[in-house]
Each structure stands twice: as C-alpha cells, then as structure tokens.
Image (tube, coloured by chain):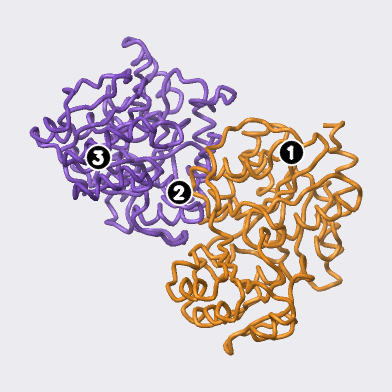
Chain colours: A orange, B purple
Amino acid sequence: MIPGKYLLFLGDADERLYAKTACGLIDWAPERCVGQWRLPTCGIDLGLPDMNFADAIKAGAKTLVIGITPFGGAIAPAWIGPIAAALHAGLNVASGMHMRLEAIPEIAAAAQGAGVSLFNIRVPVQSYPVGTGRKRTGRRMLMVGTDCAVGKKYSALAITRDMNSAGLKASFRATGQTGILIAGAGVPIDAIVSDFVAGAAEALSPDNDSDHWDVIEGQGSLFHPAYAGVALGLLHGSQPDAIILCHAAGRTHVDGYPDYPLPDISACIDMNLDLAARTNPEVRCAGISINTSALPENAREPYLASLQAEFGLPCFDPLATGAHALVEYLGQNLHPAKI
Amino acid sequence: MIPGKYLLFLGDADERLYAKTACGLIDWAPERCVGQWRLPTCGIDLGLPDMNFADAIKAGAKTLVIGITPFGGAIAPAWIGPIAAALHAGLNVASGMHMRLEAIPEIAAAAQGAGVSLFNIRVPVQSYPVGTGRKRTGRRMLMVGTDCAVGKKYSALAITRDMNSAGLKASFRATGQTGILIAGAGVPIDAIVSDFVAGAAEALSPDNDSDHWDVIEGQGSLFHPAYAGVALGLLHGSQPDAIILCHAAGRTHVDGYPDYPLPDISACIDMNLDLAARTNPEVRCAGISINTSALPENAREPYLASLQAEFGLPCFDPLATGAHALVEYLGQNLHPAKI
C-alpha cells in the first residue's frame, strides 16, 4: 500500500482526459488527496489547493502521485526536475507510467539521497502463470467498452459501491494504475507480458463464495486497433458471468483514431458475448453504463430510457444516476440461486 | 545475428512437441545444425550426432541453442550445470525462454568468465510504440490457427519458399523464438507487453512494394483460453489482406486443455475474418494449411480434397505437399492488380 495522503502532480497537462489518475483519486478517494501541483504551462485545474512540497507535507502528504497519463505512458523531461525536488523535500513518488521511475538517473539518485521510496504502480510486482481456463467459484462481472476511457473504472466502482450498499457481497478488482491507487491492490493488466494476460486476469478474481461478485474494471476495447488483444485476454481470464457494456454518449470514433468509427452498442455486446462464451458459456450482458457528461442535462434521461427500451437491460450513468437499476436487475435475474 | 553453427540442447525433453525449436532448425536451417546434446533422461532423438561441447566446437559450432520450450517457458534446474559447462567450453548460448539467461547467477558468471555471449531470443531487444491502425503499403498474409502448435510457422516458411520459387516477392516474418532463429530476425510477439502487441506487429511488416507479400508466422489462437489476446493483437497489427487457416488433422482439443474442444475450421475462419476486418476490411481467407502427420499416409489426399470441396480454397500440407496450390490461387485471385 502506498503511503498517503497524496499530493497530485498535474505537470503540464492541458486536457482533463490526460489527468484520469488525478480525477479518479479526487472522485473516489478524496480523503486521501490534500492538494495539486502544477507546472506554469499546466492548462487544467482540478479544484484542489495548489501546494508546494513543504506545505503538502505539513498538510499530511506522504506521496507525490503522478496524476496524469499522457498517450504512450512516458515521463516527460519537464517533469524530472520537480519530481526530484519532491523527493528531496521528503515525499515518496508513485507513478503509473510504463517506464520505471528508477530508469531516470536523476530521480533514482534523489530517492536514494532522501531515503524515500519510488512506487511503479504499472510495473507488475509479481509474475503470473499462463491461463488455465479452469472455471472458478463465485460470480464475476466485467466492464467492456466501445472504446478506452469511456467510464469502465467509474462504472465498476459505482456498481461495487451500490451492491455493497444493498447488502450484496461485491469487490472492486482494479486492472489499471488509477484503479490500483484507489483500491490499494490489483493487476496492471496492460503492462503484463502478452502470454500471461489471461493468467493474470484469472489471478485477479480467484475462487470466492458462491454469492460473491468480483466487479472487474475493464481495459481497452475489442474494437480498438491497438488494445483489442489486452481486452480479449482480460475477457477470457475474467470468465465473466455478466458483462456491462460501457460507452461515452456522443463519442463517434476511437479516441485518437479518427479513421476508426466506434461500433454500435449492439455489435459491441454481441462480439464480447461471442468471445467471452469460450471460457464461460453462461455469460450474458446485464446492463449498459453510459457516461452522459457530453450530453445536455435534459437529454440524459431520454437517452438512457431509449437504450433501456431497445435492449431490455438496465441503462445508467455511474456518476449521474448510480447503478441502483443494475443492482435491482441482478437481484431479480442473476441471483446465484437463479443462475 | 546469432553466431552459427549450432549445437542443439535437448535437455530432458520427453516429447518431440516440446522440441519445437530444435525440430524447426533441423527442418528449415539444417546447414546450421552440427549435433544434438542430451541429458541421460532425455526421451527423444532428433537424428543428429550426439556431441560433447569440445567435439561440437571442432565441428564448427559457435552457439548452444536451447532447442526445447517446455510449457510456461522456464529454464529447468537440471539444465543449469550443462549450460554453464558449455559456456566454459567456449560456446555462446541462445535461449527462447521467457526468463533471461543472465537471471541465473551460475550462467551469468560462466558467460562472463569464459568471455562468451548469452542471447535471449524471446526478450524484446527494443521497445515498440502503441499501434496506429494506419494502413500500410504492400500485401500481408497471416497464419491463424485452431490451436497453438498446429503448423503456423511451417506453413509460413513453406509458403514463402514456394512463392519465392514462383518468382513472387515474399518475406517470412517471424513472431516466435524458433522462427527468429531460422530467419535471423523478427519479433517475439508473445513476450511483448500487452499494450504494445499490435504496435510490434505493425513494426514487423512495415510499408513495402505494392507487389511484395509479408508472410507472417501466427501465434496462439483466438480460441485458446490463455493466448487469444496475443493472437488478436497480432491479427489487428498485421492488417492481413489474406489469412491462412492452420490446423492439425485429428486434433480435437486445445493442446493441454482437455476441457476446451477445438472450434471447427469454418467457425475459426469466420471469427478471424470478423475481427481482422476491423483493421483491414478487405481481408479474406486464401487457403487452409493442414498438418496431416497424424493421419495414415493414404488418408491425406482424401482429407485435403474434401476440405477443398467444402471451402473452395486451396488446401495443402506445408511439409507433405508444399504450398504450390496456394501460390497458384494467389496469382489468380489475389494478384495486386486484381484486389
């Protein structure tokens, strides 16, 4: 577990989309976030107090968390000086980049000199066996998406919260760096060597009580030209009893890939069910989770209602409406005794 | 390029299936194989002269190649002593295991002491960018399979050989350790971090002449409970114009997974085409390559003929019949001017 509280490093980010880690922590673990730290060129403000390293430490911060994840996952040269300064000031540093913090000599030297720690959340801390395909006990629900960054993590967190509130046994299972920071555990699935992705996904949701649900954060999309393989390995290893289709309303193309239109929701559900059936023939789609933040406020309800009518499944926005409709549907249709 | 010639290390292998690397080298680069080296417990004989290290060096060997790939890809404790002895005798050592040879202190020390080199073929020598999905020039043909170890590498090698013999421009592109040893280059696709598999596959077959074919060795299978993600990343990144379905006649279940029946050939072609169309909508299946070695000699021709009648595609055995039927079909149906 990474020592908290956290000071969130926003660097030179110019879009909230690239501050997924910081936003996720603010939304799901606000009690651990004392402030934000920005370069003069930073174009976003997440509403936390701006703090220097000494003030953050006085406010209880123990770790500077790199809160931004630029495309490709590298540490930018402009960040190195401030990160070293934070280490010298006595903060640990946690990063979700593919590159290890220690790989940058100035950062490695600063950490050693100050006697503080570097945490590489996206570097697997253990090796995983090859997938077995063996059926496990307990129930599993996997978020699948029309694209990356459509709200799979928020969906899984909201579903877990609302299932727990309703008295159901459910655990959030993190598969990405932000989820791992929020939950304190998980597997950085996109950083696993490809031969072992399904095996790592199997390890993430081991045998459990027959009425326990693992609610698994998804990664990528089967329709993403770069990340579909990650999504398929996770789908096979998770062996979901239920998938939740996640989509961002209004998104028409794969983010960053203008030549790749998004599949429609129906095609995306069908392809996921077709492939998931290989390791769990009983898989079904249990709901549709929509990030409606791009819609006008008064368009949300009609949009969700029209999807609900089309698919006969609970359709919700994890932030705006919560996942209560799904929890009710699970109780009526996917209760362990009924499967 | 790894210095040759090679002495093939068979260790304690008890099945030819686990000596894929050694068999591949003997079949496709026999001029580079001077002998075999076996532990007393070894249960297979690949027909090369048994040689000790000194005699192998006299016969021209410069590298001991670990010719066996046990399930999971680890270096067994019983191999360490002999590998160190080979290094002390003056041989380099090349391995296709996931684990780096240097990770074993006794091997690292022996290599350093003897001033010879360790080659880790399955450890990527460079990092790869995230896939772009951008269409590349030139033609690509990818082997896809009903399972692992059905003959995808032999199919790609035979097709490349027969295309070149017919005067067509074609290059074999290796995606696994044996193919890389045979070709002298390639990408160990199953050892790439999952986020970068499609990007690595894109790098393996860069822009080329419009009448040039990259003939790409496949990996895994979309129906394999552990390796489907690898297969999908390779499929998307390769952007094949043509897929060749590879199957081992008589195999009914995923090798090592008795609970997983193989898909039928038709379902396997359809699923591959469905998914491949995401990055190349013009993809088609151009042929079926069958390893018929498990069939009686007189059953081969009727089996291939019946498949050919069912699918209307060239059906061949890369070793027993060669790929001439496919080369003819390509000229008639997939000539660059006709696509």
Element under disc 2:
loop
Q: Is residue B288 left or right of residue A39?
A: left
Q: Nearer the viewer, residue A235 or A256?
A: A235
Q: Say yes or no: labels 2 and 3 on the same chain.
A: yes
Q: Is residue B167 left or right of residue A94?
A: left
Can residue B339 be seen at all in this image of the molecule?
no
Residue B201: percent from the left, percent from the top? 40, 52
Task: Tell me the kind of residue under disc 1.
Answer: Asp
Task: Tell me the kind of residue under disc 2.
Answer: Glu
Element under disc 1:
loop
Residue B56: percent from the left, percent from the top? 13, 32
- Mark 3 crowdedness (10 Å alpha carbons): few <14, some 14-19, many ≥20: many
Chain identifier of the residue bearing label 3 in the image: B
Which numbered dot is residue B282? 2
Picture quarter containing residue A155?
bottom right
**How far is the residue under mark 1 from the one under mark 3?**
43 Å
Q: Nearer the viewer, residue A179 or A92?
A: A92
Residue at the image position 84 percent from the left and 38 percent from the top: A334
- Badge 2 or badge 3: first in the primary sequence: 3
**How far is the residue under mark 2 from the one under mark 1?**
34 Å
Which numbered dot is residue A241? 1
Residue corresponding to mark 3: B182
Residue at the image position 76 percent from the left and 66 percent from the top: A29
Residue B90: percent from the left, percent from the top? 16, 42
**How far is the residue under mark 2 from the one under mark 3?**
31 Å
Residue at the image position 31 percent from the left and 27 percent from the top: B11
Can residue B65 be seen at all in this image of the molecule?
yes
Marks 1 & 3, CB-CB < 8 Å contact = no
Marks 2 & 1, CB-CB < 8 Å contact = no
- Mark 2 crowdedness (10 Å alpha carbons): few <14, some 14-19, many ≥20: some
Which numbered dot is residue A130? none
